[in-house]
């Protein structure tokens, strides 16, 4: 098959790596890709927002299936656009992508299908929002309704903090149109977990769970990032999977299908496991980053076959097979991250990798034939092992061999599973 992956981060490197496999003869293209992806696939210098040009490329090169990594093109309707031109594509259409593109829309969907989630109010008037916050008290969670590149949520410990967040979103409009409306939520306590599922409108195939680490410093301290590492499985929370399947993934897929707007693609449930069980924090409509980097090395199936089965609405024919053992990913970040990262720092990488380690590129580029930093999250350093502690040791020993000035990483990825 000829497969075209859109995006250029660590998630897309993991997707391309898995699609390429060791014994398939798939031909993979990636736009724009990155230097790591360029080693195993053909990179195309188009950005994810150039939907017209991407479709032209898919048509000219007779691509069998296009796979979209990031959320922006999905909420912008890339799937509808490709389908109108009869180009096969994997992912939700614009309507379905609202599950991620509007937090208020997602809340309404959850309400309709009785999915457990935090109590909330949707507001678009600053004074009313402020009054609601004062009435509810702190802690309280303020969310910009639209996409905000992972920066639109404030877990406010005080009313003052909540007011600052509301003012930033609704008055100063720091997220543009995305923040003119807000969702104000009850603050949930517990541990977070991610469950992704393949959905073809009817069939729901959940993947193995994983856990991300958002704050930049050990012990979940410091500002939030795109994710500093992940691991899978999550043994201490695994007992909740049947409930997550029955009360979250299936009701959403079945409910949307019954309403005449079937969901197709990846359904990502971000959950808080509270003392009253799992509650949904948010839905995303694509693979997570860095969850993908730990999940895909555990998958036995040919990923292209699964994508094709979803696109052709015959996911019921697929049985997902998972490798035993565990997978851990530690992000190597550039100095400054999650603030503006230092770009252009020369990088050296270990010469050899074992079959059970991967270094997925995210923020890298080539400058005069030298690999240099080019973003906040530079690499996802991943390893698999018989259990979490073995995978973790491998990942940490590998990250020591990745060199660039000011490299920082969390030293406690997967520690929650071991304590
Ligand atoms: N209701 C909530 N209670 C407690 N923490 C929350 C709540 N909603 C979100 N969070 C925290 O904020 C983070 C980001 O929120 P999320 O809804 O996932 O937005 P996004 O990923 O779009 O930034 C979550 O991973 C979680 O740590
Ligand atoms: Mg999130």
Image: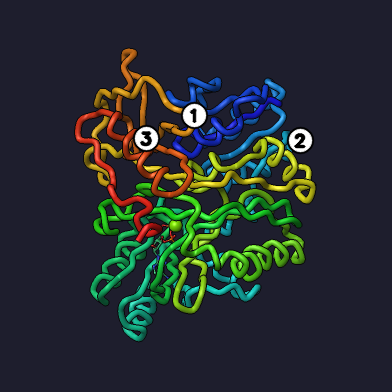
Of labels 3 and 2, the one closer to you: 3
Please tell me whether residue 175 is drawn above or below residue 106 in the rendered image: above
1 and 2 marks in contact (CB < 8 Å): no
Q: Position of residue 397 (x, y in %)?
A: 32, 36
Q: Residue at x 78, y 43 (%)?
A: 312
In depth, the one of 286 and 357 nearer the eye is 357
Q: Residue 86, which numbered label? A: 2
Q: Name which of mark 3 and mark 1 comes first in the sequence.
A: 1
* Quarter of the rendering occupied by the N terminus: top right
Q: Name which of mark 1 and mark 2 comes first in the sequence.
A: 2
In depth, the one of 156 and 323 nearer the eye is 323
Q: Is residue 339 left or right of residue 22?
A: left
Q: Is residue 163 left or right of residue 325?
A: left
Of labels 1 and 2, the one closer to you: 1
Write down which quadrant ligand 1 falls in. bottom left
Q: Quadrant of residue 351?
A: top left
Q: Label 3: which residue?
A: 379
Q: Label 1: which residue?
A: 355
Q: CA distance from mark 3 to mark 2?
A: 36 Å
Please tell me whether residue 26 is drawn above or below residue 212 in the rendered image: above
Q: Residue at x 28, y 47 (%)?
A: 410
Q: Position of residue 379 (x, y in %)?
A: 37, 35
């Amino acid at each position: 098959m000829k497969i075209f992956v859109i995006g250029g981060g660590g998630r897309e490197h993991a997707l391309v790596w898995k699609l390429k496999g060791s014994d398939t003869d798939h031909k993979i293209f990636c736009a724009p890709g990155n230097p790591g992806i360029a080693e195993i696939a053909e990179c195309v210098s188009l950005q994810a927002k150039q939907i017209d040009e991407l479709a032209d490329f898919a048509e000219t090169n007779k691509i069998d299936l296009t796979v979209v990594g990031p959320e922006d093109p999905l909420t912008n309707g890339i799937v509808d656009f490709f389908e109108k031109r009869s180009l096969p594509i994997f992912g939700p259409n614009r309507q379905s992508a609202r599950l991620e593109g509007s937090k208020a829309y997602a809340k309404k969907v959850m309400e309709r299908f009785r999915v457990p989630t935090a109590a909330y109010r949707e507001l678009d008037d600053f004074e009313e929002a402020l009054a609601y916050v004062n009435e509810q008290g702190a802690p309280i969670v303020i969310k910009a309704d639209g996409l905000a590149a992972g920066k639109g949520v404030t877990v406010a410990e005080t009313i003052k903090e909540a007011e600052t967040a509301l003012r930033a979103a609704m008055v100063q409009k720091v997220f543009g149109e995305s923040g003119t409306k807000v969702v104000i939520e009850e603050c949930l306590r517990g541990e977070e977990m991610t469950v992704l599922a393949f959905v073809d409108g009817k069939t729901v195939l959940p993947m193995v769970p994983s856990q991300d680490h958002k704050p930049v410093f050990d012990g979940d301290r410091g500002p939030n990032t795109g994710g500093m590492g992940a691991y899978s499985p999550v043994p201490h929370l695994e007992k909740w999977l049947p409930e997550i399947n029955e009360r979250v993934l299936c009701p959403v897929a079945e409910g949307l299908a019954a309403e005449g707007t079937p969901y197709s693609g990846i359904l990502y449930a971000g959950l808080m496991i509270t003392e009253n069980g799992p509650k949904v924090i948010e839905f995303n409509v694509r693979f997570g980053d860095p969850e993908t980097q730990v999940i895909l090395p555990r998958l036995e199936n040919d990923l292209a076959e699964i994508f094709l089965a979803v696109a052709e609405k015959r996911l019921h024919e697929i049985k997902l097979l998972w490798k035993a053992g565990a997978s851990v990913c530690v992000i190597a970040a550039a100095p400054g991250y999650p603030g503006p990262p230092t770009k252009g720092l020369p990088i050296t990488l270990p010469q050899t990798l074992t079959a059970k380690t991967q270094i997925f590129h995210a923020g890298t580029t080539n400058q005069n034939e030298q690999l240099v930093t080019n973003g906040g999250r530079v690499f996802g350093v991943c390893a698999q092992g018989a259990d979490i502690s073995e995978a973790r040791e491998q990942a940490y020993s590998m990250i020591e061999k990745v060199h660039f000035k000011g490299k920082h990483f969390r030293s406690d990825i997967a520690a929650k599973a071991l304590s």
